[in-house]
Image (spheres, helix red, strand yellow):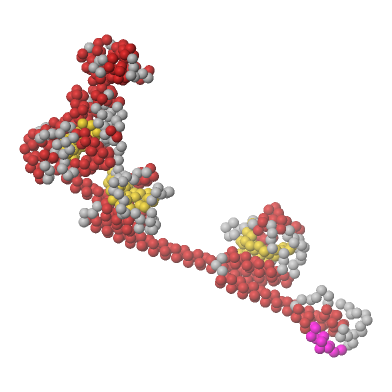
Amino acid sequence: MSAPRDIEPTQGADVSVAAVLALLDLAAKGRPDERDAVTDLLLTERLDTATVNQVGRRVRELQGAVARLRRRGQELSALFSSARELAELHDVDLLITRLVRRAHDLAGTDVTYLSEFDETTHELKVRSTAGAVAPSFQKLSVPPHTGLASKVVESRAPQWTSRYEQLHDVPHVESIDSAVRAEGLVSILGVPLIAGDQVLGVLFAANRDEHAFSPEEVSLLSAFADNVAVVLQSARLLTRTREAAAETQYAYDALAAHVEAMERASRVHEELTTAVLRGGGAADVARTLGAALERPVVILDETYAVIASSDDRSTASVIDPPAIRSAITDSLASGHCTLLNPPPGDFHAAVAVLAGEMMLGGLLIGAGGVELGAVEQRTIERAAQITALLTLKQDAVLYAEDRVRGELLGDLVSPDFRHHSSLPARLQARRLRPDDLRTVVIAVVAPEQRRAALRAAHTAAAPSGLAGEVDGVVTLVVPESDPQRAATAVRDRVCAGTGVGEVLTVAAPPAETLEELSVRFSAARDCCRVLAALGLEAAAVAADAYLPYTTLFAHDPTSVRQFIEHTIGPVLRWDAERGTDLLATLHRFVDCNASPARAARLMGVHTNTVLQRLDRVTQLLGSAWREPESYFRVSVAVRLQALSETVLDPSSHNRQRPQDG
């Protein structure tokens, strides 16, 4: 540095106090001015060149020292702030964002960003940015052994380039280069984030113009990176500690909940066992389980009728939507509780009540406060087993009673008169009056419905009658003196008890004495067989209405179809093939005592029409069909066929007589 020509320095001159103060101010700035203000100031004091250079060098050293102290102060401030945020923040992402912003302010570059090292993929993924604008850059991921970032990780030392596009000593990837170009970065400095022996990531400072990073800038960013690495490692450890604590708390809560559930299950099991020992029933199971689960519990029988509930639900209702049936069917196959998802209505779980492979009913669990976990589901299954035990116990009692009553009923309707002398005393022992046992009613149901039908029959016969199974059919002897009303009442009760739409019930004429009951039973049973052979499975009838047909075919009910086919089969086939209705004309002709004119009037057609149709019948059946013997057979066959084709209206209580046509 040369002195101005117009000033002649004076060797050994003193410096003024004002100049000293000015030099101290310049040193305190911590950075040199664009022009050399120190030299200019010293030359005004008329000092020699050597002195000017010596003082100027010392002032600039002071400026450097002050600058370093300020940087260290900034670093310490950043470190203290990071430590404070680490203690205050629970969100690691937010902490990293703040650290990057502080590094951005400290470095003074255009863009600052932090890439975190992924130990699984060994990629460096941009975690946070400050000053970046390109979306692609903010999601940048650098593969291993690629770009400046990988060079920093592998060397574990700062790396920088003043012009990224001229960086040729590292492999390039087009996706990374495109992101750098999109952000407009030219010069990039990267320093490693090292904690112990582990590289956590890289802290970058970049400019959008060419720039040669000075050792001070590299040192400053490296020092801050060391602080960031410590903070980041501490944050990771703190996060893991919190996660471990949360997992421990979760495990503790789960254990506490499990213990509570086990205690609740133990209480339920104890109360249900007590209910079994003291002779309780399904209502005790529903009430105990409902109180323990804080959920409504409904118990169904095998027909899905409600037999007990923890709330005040009517036991006359039936719950059998498809979802409920499907859930109980699944439980029947698996033996376990089935959760309903989505729940149909108010019910969230179902389990079948089983005895071996026989379904006795089901348990339905409604909505409530206690979660249906594994222990709760096992508790529900145990309750279903207790319900099965109670049901079997009650059935055993009923079976014993039924056996006594069944033997009594069997002797009542038996043709063996050897037991009749003891019947009055035996009836009196069962608190039954012989005069009340008037009408025999038989109900025809499928074998799988017989158990439910017998329960319904006992209800229908109580308290003055008897019900049971005789010769494989459900049989009742009731006080009702009107056979039709008796058949209808039993039909309605059995339909409700079995859950089926219709059953066949037949009532014999009332008996005047106990000895007549065996004959009435035979008449009702024969009538059932004939009607069943005709295909009638849904009716409530009085046996007397079908007495002629019963008399003819009781010995072989299956022959009734053969008789119809043999007698009027050609007429039936003619109608079926051509869509005609000769049978209706023939039926009306029979009803009108073989009078074509009367038949025509009743049918609303001309007599010649009836005669033409009868001629067709003659062609089909032969000319002898109107002879007395043949005509009788045709009349019976026509009435039987009309009876088998009659669609009985439930609203009419099935009182239609076959002769009504």
Residue at the extreme left: 421
The residue shown at (26%, 25%) is 660
Q: Can you tell which quarter of the image residue 182 is in? A: bottom right
- The vertical placement of 223 against 651, above or below, is below
- Tell me if residue 17 is in the magenta stretch: yes
| Residue 331 visible here | yes
Front residue of this view, candidates 504 and 402: 504
Magenta residue span? 13-23
The image quadrant that residue 119 belongs to is bottom right
Give the vertical position of 263 relative to 425 (above or below): below
x, y (%) of residue 255?
A: 39, 63
In this orientation, which residue lies closer to the viewer: 420 or 391? 420
Query: Considering the image in quadrants, where does the C terminus appear?
Result: top left
Q: Quadrant of the N terminus?
A: bottom right
Q: Is residue 142 visible?
A: no
Q: Residue at (70%, 78%) from the top-left corner?
A: 69
Residue 487 placement (x, y as % from top left): 22, 35
Q: Is residue 3 left or right of residue 443?
A: right
Residue at image point 88% right, 85% down = 46
Is 40 drawn above or below residue 273 in the view shown?
A: below
